[in-house]
Image (cartoon, coloured by chain):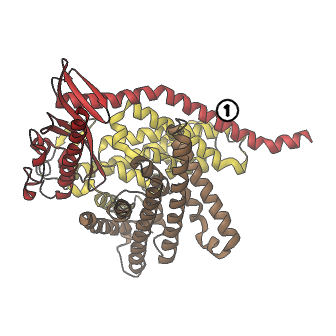
Amino acid sequence: MRVKMGKFGKEFAKGIIISNPVFILALGLCPALAVSTSIDNALGMTLAVLIVLLGSNIIIAAIRKIVPNIMRIPIFIVIIATLVTVVTLIFHANFPDLYEALGIYLPLVVVNCIILARAEAFASKNPIVYSVADALGITVGFMLALLIISFFRQMLGTGNLSVFGVNLFTLPILGEHPMVMFILPPGAFLVIGLLLALFRRTGVMKSE
Amino acid sequence: MKANTLKKIFPVVLITAVVFASVALLNWTDSITRGKIEYQKEQQIQNMLTEMFPNMSQYTFEDDIYTIYSDGAEVGYAFIALGKGYGGNIDILVGLEDEATIKGIIIISHSETPGLGSRVAESSFTDKFAGLNIADVALSRDGGQIDAITGSTISSRAVIDAVRATAMEKVKLLKGGEE
Amino acid sequence: MNELITIFISMALINNFILVRYLGLCPFFGVSKNVGSAVSMGIAVTFVMSIASLATWLINHYILIPFDMEYMYIIIYILVIASLVQIIELFIKRTNLALYFSFGIYLPLITTNCAVLGITFINMIENYSLLGSIVSALGAGLGFTLVLFIMSNIRERLELADSPKSMRGLPIAFLIAVLLGLAFFGFGGMI
């Protein structure tokens, strides 16, 4: 089967902006807001989502032709839940700090609408290669969305910008007296609400 | 006839195979990660005990109380206290120098408000417990020796109450065990 | 008894699922445009949460822990919830067809509601007793319903207002959530 690079690229790019999971499809809001308190956590969650989404898209695309219609959802759930459990155990054993930081949101990836929606809408109907492109694109879109949100929340909420424990820079006034609200839930809602409004105003997204 | 029954049982066979594969994979993953996870828990406790008792050479754990030894001599005790904080449980490691004096405390984990209640984990607060008589572990306004963190009376009080109550309980156990 | 009341108030108000724990956000923003459907969703979710908490507690204590299979919790819990929702859906379809249609797609969507799976995880982590788990689920569900009720009332009235075009719909809902969240911080001093 010849892989059309054009189509691969198209499916990949789709997930980044046009079908951005967080901002456009409004999927996976719960973990997106919960872990965007710092850039490190956002990247950690992205890694988890990447493994699970890639794994589930590949497996489901591989068996898509032999799964009877009625059995679709239960089998998808079992596959996704298995992948999430594996990721949770591996993180617990090898990345304990990340595991602590992500808390219950790591196992909650199993009901992250992004994963099930992509399995249902794409991987079950497309060959493995394009399902991989879709998974990668969606993950990049997810990562970008999370990075933007956590950038603002971390900057305003703690006054520092740090990646992997390395402090990049500290803001002058906010470093001493950060606006704590931004790392709390109300701050999360504020940041994403304003971002959505901004995207609509500047035409990146359509208004209702 | 044969093709028909095959078609009917195929879904069942498939889902059984999938479940089987998943359970097998999980069992295997669990077996390779379990050891590490247990080891980390032990390491974490050990690190905290060493932080609290710098000259510790070994420790034993019995009836929920750690007994700390330095070259064979008993130098103190430690145990975990649970505080009822604003955001949930606050896990506290409490060290005792002897049966009446606190060696120090370390906040193991909490879900308090960042910037406010979370400051109970900072040394500026936890240092205040070092060397105190168990009876003096209370807020200044309640007749004790510790000032609450501004804006986080609930979190401060949760830690204080848990430390005092659990310490008194453990001391009773220790004294009872000696008789 | 005291402890049960603390658990209930903690789950319902102080650590409200939507405004503090970031759980159940999808239905929060999806169903909250209409008071009736919002409250129905809330009650349905509370119901599923409670039964799921009961079922998962039993499975956890009588199967997972004795057989040293705690790592299976993610798979088992989600399958329990999925089956529960299926059964409830069938039951509603047989007994009250109108209700079934009014729920539409939102009933099966309760399966992927992070709040339902979330409460089972929280019960496990906090190690509540059987009664404690059910009380915690009731508290969580009712708190969820309360916030949904408030939000939908506000949004219904906002539909009539003249909001800026780019703010309509989701952005304004988020801003309302900011205010609600800040307000709920006041519950902190209750216990």
A76 over A55 or under it: above or below: below
Q: Chain C shown in which color?
A: brown
Q: Check disc 1 and report the residue beneath it.
A: A1
Identified by mark 1, the residue type is: Met
Q: Nearer the viewer, residue A111 or C89?
A: C89
- Estimate the x, y position of residue C115 in percent, counting from the top left: 46, 57
Q: Is residue B10 left or right of residue A197?
A: right
Is residue A8 among the parts visible in the rendering? Answer: no
State which chain is coloured yellow.
Answer: A
- Estimate the x, y position of residue B81 in percent, counting from the top left: 26, 44
Q: Is residue A65 left or right of residue C183?
A: right
- Estimate the x, y position of residue A41 in percent, counting from the top left: 33, 42
Image quadrant containing the N terminus of chain C: bottom left
State the residue at coordinates (34%, 40%): A100
State the residue at coordinates (73%, 40%): A66
Element class at badge 1: loop
The quadrant holding residue B93 is: top left
